[in-house]
Structures are given as C-alpha cells and as structure tokens.
Image: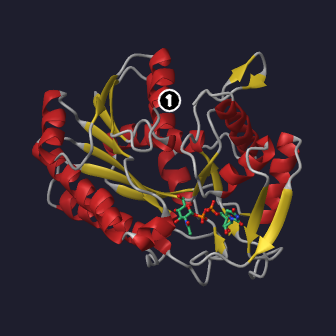
Amino acid sequence: MNILITGGAGYIGSHVAKQLLETTSYNIIILDNLSTGSIKTLDTLKAIREFKFIQLDLKEFDEINNVLKENKINTIIHFAASIVVPESVENPLKYYMNNTVNTTNLIKCAVENNVSKFIFSSTAAVYGEPTNIPENGIDETYPTNPINPYGMSKLMSEKVLQDTASVNDDFKYVIFRYFNVAGADINYEDDKLTPRIGQSFPNATHLIKIVSECATGERDKMSIFGDDFDTKDGTGVRDYIHVDDLADAHIKAIKYLDNNISEIFNAGYGKGYSVKEVIEVAKKAANANFQVNITSRRAGDPAILISDNRKIKSKMSWTPKYEKLELICKSAYEWENRLGENIK
Ligand code: UD1
C-alpha cells in the first residue's frame, strides 16, 4: 500500500506518520511545503524508518497529479491546511484557496488516479457555536454552522468529498472532526517522558501550547479569555484529545475502509475541562507557577465544546490510551522543554 500524507511535517500529520512508520510496513510518502512544517521533524521520522519526502505546495495542480501517478498512491491522508481562525477572518481567500480549492484539486487528482481511500482532517469548528448541547456531547448529526472562514473552508471540503464519493463507487473517505488536539509524542527514554516530535510552529494560539510556554518560562504570563461563561467555573470548556490517540484513529481508518462505507467521525474524548482546570493541571504536571490574568472573551469562542464520541468508539473500536489531562499537559510541557534545547 502506498500512502500519501499531505502536511506530514506538521503537528498532527507527523504523529500519524510516526505511527505508520513504527507499526506498519506501508510505503509512506510525505508531501509538505514546509511553510509551517518542520524539517527537523522529518529527520526525526527518518530515524524510525525511511520514507520519501516531496516538498511541494498543493496549489501545484499538475505536479500533484504526477506525484499520485508516479508513486501509485492508493490512500491519501490529507492534513495540509491553514488553521488559524482569526487569520481566516482577516484573510478568507487564503483559507478558501489553501483549504477548499487545494483540497478539491487533490480529490479530483485522487479520483483520476484511482486512489481508493481518502482520510480528511476536519474540525469541530464546523459546528460553530452550539447552543443546546446534548447530555452526551455533540454528535455527528448536530447541525453544522461554521462561524468563521476556517470552519467553512473545512465544511466545504467535506461536501466536495461526500458528493464525489457518492458518484465514484471505488472512492471512499473517512472525515475526522477534531476537537482540541494537544500533547506530544508519548515516548520514554530511561523512564523519562521524552517526546521526539510535537507542536513546533511558533506563535501558537492554542491553550495547552501557551500554558506550556509559560511553564518553561519562555512566556512570562497568559490570559484567560473570559470567566463569565455559563460553565462550571465561568471559563470555557473544551474536549482535549491527545495527538497520539488521534493519530491511532487515522491508522484504524485505513483498515476500516476495507470493509465499511464512508463515514464522518468526531474525534474527542467526550469529556470537558475548563480553562482554569487545564491551567491547574498543567502547573502541577510541570511543577511550575506563572501569572494568569483574566481578560475579556475572545470573539467567536463558544462556552462549551464536547464531542459525543460513541460513533468512533463503537464503529472503529477506537480505544484511547492517553485520556489523562495530566499526561496531555506533561507531554506538551516536556516537548516545549526540548524545543527550548533546540531540538526543533
Ligand atoms: C481553536 C479554534 C477551533 C479549532 C481548534 C483546533 C478558535 C476560536 N477556535 O479552538 O476552530 O478547530 O482551535 O485547531 O480559534 N484560551 C484562553 N487563553 C489563551 C488561549 C485559549 O483562555 O491564551 C481559552 C479559549 O478561550 C478556549 C480554550 O482556552 O476557551 C481553548 O482555546 P484554544 O486552545 O485556542 O482552542 P479553541 O478556541 O477551542
């Protein structure tokens, strides 16, 4: 099997590549334009097992077609995308071009080159700002209503995939709607948690990355964006999923499509933690303290986002291993430490 991973030098793509290199003998081809992906991550992956790396932007339509043809690709796992929500509001065309247009072209090339499986990174941002959250969280039938171009660019890509698969019997997809992905490679050296890869891109806006930067001393303080939400302690509640558990779902999706129809799955643990809880747990995990201010809400932040994950658990037999928030925070912190030591 020849698998193309777009965005394989990025955060989530590299964790999927790591697991494929470690646990399978599939032939792996990573495609990345290295705009946010890390060359050092690719070197780390090469130490696990050899693979082919192609530095190419997805907008190079003709070349993408050649890559699929020449490498006889039969499975695509597509991560490459722009992912910063506020940027998507300021520059929507960047998001519709990089995400929707480039994904559409990739799907077209895939069908024309007899690719049979397409695994796509979507996001809980397709649900927008959910109002009445069911007791078990948001399931895959919950109405989609993105409130920013990022979420819309992903939802439009989902539709292109669905419509294409509906008229091409030999082309199947799995769409994963990620909740809040966090943490880093669970790897122990001399009994010490020593992540080899993690979130490398600077200027991240995500909570656990920011908390980790505070814990290492790289950043001196942080803000909680609002403590007046209708939640347990007034701060926003999210469903944090460890990147290695998410990666495992992608590996399972490859086999899943051998005997099952195309499907959309939420990817989350179905358990919510508030911003205050995350900060407390992270401080403890890192044995660190830092200043935390309360500021006003960030535009477009829903109060609560928790997945109903019963579908992925039952249909894919997905059993998460790293659900403990402390381990998620600890791995993110240890990775941040290593970044500081220039293991970027
Ligand atoms: C963000 C995106 C979402 C995307 C997801 C994964 C926004 C509005 N949403 O989710 O569309 O699918 O990443 O890429 O950008 N927080 C603080 N202080 C901080 C940082 C965050 O209080 O310095 C709070 C936020 O208000 C939120 C929670 O922490 O309540 C999580 O925030 P974040 O990690 O940025 O993820 P989301 O906004 O949930």
Q: Where is ligand 1, by quadrant?
A: bottom right
Task: Specify whether residue 318 is in view.
Answer: no
**Helix, strand or loop under label 1:** helix
Q: Identify whether 169 is placed above or below 153.
A: above
Q: Quadrant of the N terminus?
A: top left
Q: x and y percent of residue 263 in the render?
A: 37, 57
From the top left corner, tell me how far across and down residue 161 is, in percent: 26, 59
Left or right relative to 35: residue 56: left
Instruction: Tell me which residue sits at (44%, 44%) in the image.
Output: 36
Query: Which of the image's four quarters has the C terminus?
Result: top right
- Relative to residue 251, is residue 61 depicted above or below? below
Circle 1 packing at 10 Å, graded few (<14), some (14-19), many (20+), is many
Residue 50 shows in this picture? yes
Left or right of residue 32: residue 241: right
Where does the image place residue 28, in percent across and percent down from the top left?
A: 34, 27
- Which residue is drawn at the image coordinates 64% and 69% (left, top)? 136
**Which residue lies at the image location 38% right of the left edge and 20% below the top edge?**
25
- Residue at mark 1: 41
User: 176 and 70: which one is in front?
Assistant: 70
Q: Residue 254 at x, y = what percent?
A: 37, 39
Query: In screen coordinates, is 322 left or right of 125?
Result: right
7 and 318: which one is in front? 7
Q: Is residue 87 left or right of residue 130?
A: left
Residue 224 or residue 182, whichever sits in front: 224
Residue visible at 43% across and 23% down?
24
Q: Amino acid at mark 1?
A: Thr
